[in-house]
Amino acid sequence: DGGITQSPKYLFRKEGQNVTLSCEQNLNHDAMYWYRQDPGQGLRLIYYSQIVNDFQKGDIAEGYSVSREKKESFPLTVTSAQKNPTAFYLCASISRGLAGALFGNEQFFGPGTRLTVL
Amino acid sequence: AQKITQTQPGMFVQEKEAVTLDCTYDTSDQSYGLFWYKQPSSGEMIFLIYQGSYDEQNATEGRYSLNFQKARKSANLVISASQLGDSAMYFCAMRETYNFNKFYFGSGTKLNVKP
């Protein structure tokens, strides 16, 4: 079955440690995204990547880093510089297409990772 | 300025009744797309419905319909015949031509369906 997998589902980290969240998709999608969601809040964009070896900062990129070495993988590293990393992290992907032709393509989301800093 | 505004943090509806969740958006693009997602307590994001800016008819998907008023820049979600399983967070999102692969999300509306 095609889809997006995120691991782990729950992650605990000590203060001062870097941690990497995994996101893998087998949908052959070009663009991938990382969002952060705090309790009762909406989604805020951390980073996104439209093609391999390229990515752009979103609205809250400080304290995070990403890589896109393979089309199917877009790992997110939460660094010690991120002051309040406890949150729910969602990965998403979409098939990049021509505007107008595939404008209605929705984002597909993974199940998310809940990160807690102890 | 907020790209997507959802002004109802929480809503209650009686089972089997219809409910409207509000969404207004801000864009200067002529071509854009509007989406609604449902997020149950498990956290997964479930795509519900899409409306293109040039679509003349309101989008419908089963019990979901989108009340699209372009001049008012509103894209309200209507859920007919509410079910207990509809209790969840609902997010409105927009995609613009200018930055085609960036999506803007609203802050969400928590819907509670009462038996």
Image (cartoon, coloured by chain):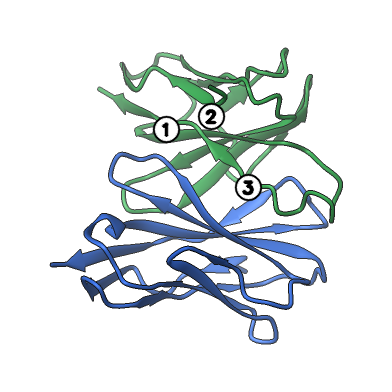
Chain colours: A green, B blue
Residue A48: x %, y % from top left: 67, 35
Chain of the residue under the numbered disc 2 shown in the image? A
Q: Of helix, strand and loop, which one carries label 3?
A: loop
Q: Nearer the viewer, residue A4 or B6?
A: A4
Number of the label disc, if any, that sits on residue A63? 2
Q: Which residue is mark 1?
A: A83
Q: Is residue A54 above or below residue B10?
A: above
Q: Nearer the viewer, mark 3 or mark 2?
A: 3
Q: Nearer the viewer, residue B106 or B48?
A: B48
**Inter-mark Cα distance, 1 to 3:** 32 Å
Q: B79 left or right of B81?
A: right
Contact (Cβ within 8 Å) of mark 2 with mark 1: yes
Label 1 marks which chain's residue? A
The reply to whether dot 3 and dot 2 touch (C-beta < 8 Å) is no
Q: Earlier in the sequence, mark 2 or mark 1?
A: 2
Q: Amino acid at mark 1?
A: Lys
Residue, disc 3 = A106
Mark 2: secondary structure:
loop
Residue type, numbered disc 3 = Glu
- Looking at the image, is A8 positioned above or below residue B30? above
